[in-house]
Image: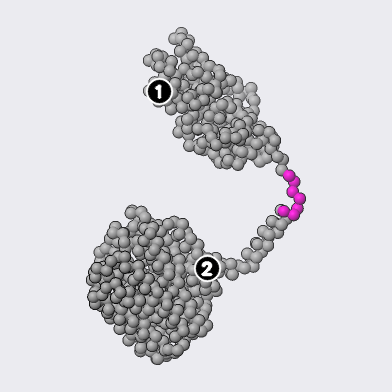
Amino acid sequence: MPASSKISGWRGTVLVAVTYVYFLIFAQFAFLARLTQLGIPSAALQPVMAAMAAGGILFSFVTPHLVERFKASTLLRIGFSLSAAAAALSLTSFAEPGAVVIALLIGAGLGIVTVSLVTHLPQWCGTQRPLLSIGVGTGLGYVLCNIPGLFNAAPQAQAAVAAILCVIGFAAASSSNAQFIAPSTTAASTPFPLLLAGFAALVWLDSAAFYIIQHTASLKSASWSGPTHLWIIGSIHFAAAIVSALLLRTRQATLVLCCAVAALGAACLLLAHPSSIPAATLLYPAGVSLYSVALVAYPAFLSGANTIRQRAQRAAWIYALAGWIGSALGIGMGQHLGSVPLAFVCAATAVVAIPALHALLRAHLREFAMLASTLVLAFALQHLLPASSPHAASTPIERGRQLYISEGCISCHSQYVRPGTADELMWGPVTPLALIHAQQPPLIGNRRQGPDLAQIGARRSPLWLQAHLADPAALSYRSPMPSYAFLFSDTRGGDLIAYLSSLRTPSSAHDQKQSAWHLDQSAWASASVTDGARLYHQHCATCHSSNGAARTRWSANTAKLLPDLRALTASAQSQSEDRLAHITKFGAANTSMPGHEYLSGHDIASLVLWLIHPANQPSLADSQPTGDIQ
């Protein structure tokens, strides 16, 4: 082991940074751009990328068989040599077969470098804050990739830089004589397959978002345009990498992955909205760096591997399955869909969250066991003990009440006239408490999105109720209530009407109070013919106009004609105004004419004034109803 573990830690930082820069700036950028420069058709891209993935997967699984036979420095030198050769060959002129060979070299070199580096990373990072060394290396790699001069350089320049970095990695790897060092960080309790699935989901998300940004001009210009923006992106990468390393030092691997999937998932969804692209370009690098540090640190220090061979095998599975295959699936999603579906973001989040749930279960196993036992016991008692049979609804009213409950009518309608308030005149008499207590269950409700229904049977006819349930907005101006026309495809609609019609409590005192009601003079004084015309077309025309929606649909169901409004004489004008106002307020007894209890005194007076205005008398012939639906 080197004399200074501090120096060794910086060597690990350099190796991690070099590996990330090579992969990001050359394998994902420069090599593909070089293919375009040489005129290699886009149809050849698929076999080229398949060769790169095949080389990466193959040599990721081959390397674990070599880690015990070769020194760490030897394997790293082989990997960096292959990687440098690929970068150098990309500077030459080549056709499609040459592109496949170079892609295979890139995959092979990266497969050897990643697995062998992570397997021996404890000796490169030393014993002083090794996870922080990984975080600094990862963040530094992303910062270098976002340096404007390198990011915007020609593909040949980027390839040359990649080759030079491989030489630096070769030199850093060959300067150590250290042997295998067991990780000092204890293993996490989460099973390895769960973490592997989480990494695969994250790489999938990352690759899909990266491809979409790269191949959408507006997204690419908004994400990687201008030196200032590139420096900001690099800074976010570095800061997120340091945060990830600090969390991993405190055994927060699952928290790191959950934060990463939250940031990446949000970025993927925001990319679909142009106004949200700036936010997405900030969340994306944060999520990438969060999981990138864990992608290196986990197999090296947190996977629970006890031997060098086991550590190499787990690294191979992570980089082959999560890295190469996850990346290919993400790119395929970006190519075929052009976006990341919400369902996939939710699925990826669930996969990443499974380790956290597993850790929570292990930490509170006793409590979960007690809860499960209680639930099983309750389930058994429910099915083993004899239960009293509920009373089956036998009448239309009983069935209608059950339908009222099942359709959630209580969510918008109350059945409670508040004593001593305007409710009494508007909605009807107060229901005796004895009747409310007798309800099983009581349906008094606590919300009024719509009118109170405690006395609806006394205020609305069965025909009006049916018409309103079928098309609420046709009878009630701007009603937000949904249609329940489907209930009338069978007997359910009739049952509900039977129940609603039963909601009435006769009260002579209330009838006298309604009979004594009249508009005060201030309402008449403020009445407006113009307002009356507007109110008529909003609340009355549906039934009182020859082409009104409710009149057209339900006139065949009516039988009783209402008095002709034209029969009102000038000599009886005062009496006619009071009568019309009373009918408008409370409706017409023994007809389907509803009251408009919620209209103000001014509105009622304006409506009546418009109805009896001489200028309107000729038009009332068109408004004369043929039946009692009003």
Residue at 60% over, 26% down:
458
Q: Local crowd at mark 2 within 10 Å, few (<14), some, or many (≥20)?
A: many
| Quarter occupied by residue 45 | bottom left
Query: Dot 2: what SS?
Result: helix
Q: Residue at x 40, y 81 (%)?
A: 112
What residue sits 48% from the left and 24% below the top? Answer: 551
Q: Amino acid at mark 2?
A: Pro
Residue 126 sits in which quadrant? bottom left
C-alpha separation, residue under disc 2 versus residue under disc 1: 67 Å
| Numbered circle sitting on residue 355 | 2
Image location (x, y in percent) of residue 332: 39, 63
Which image quarter holds the N terminus?
A: bottom left
Residues at circles 2 and 1 in contact by the CB criterion of under 8 Å:
no
> Circle 1 sits in a helix, a strand or a loop, which is it?
helix
Confirm whether residue 578 shows in the render.
yes
Q: Which residue is located at x 45 percent, y 59 percent?
A: 344
* One can see residue 150 in this view: no
Q: Amino acid at mark 1?
A: Ala
Q: Give whichever of 40, 506 is nearer the camera.
A: 40
* Numbered tag placed on residue 454 in the rendering: none
The image shows residue 378 at horizontal and vertical percentages of 70, 56
The residue identified by callout 1 is 533
Earlier sequence position, callout 2 versus callout 1? 2
**Which span is picked out in magenta?**
383-389
**Of 41 and 613, the residue lying toward us:** 41
Q: Main secondary structure of the magenta part?
A: loop
Residue 465, percent across and down?
56, 29
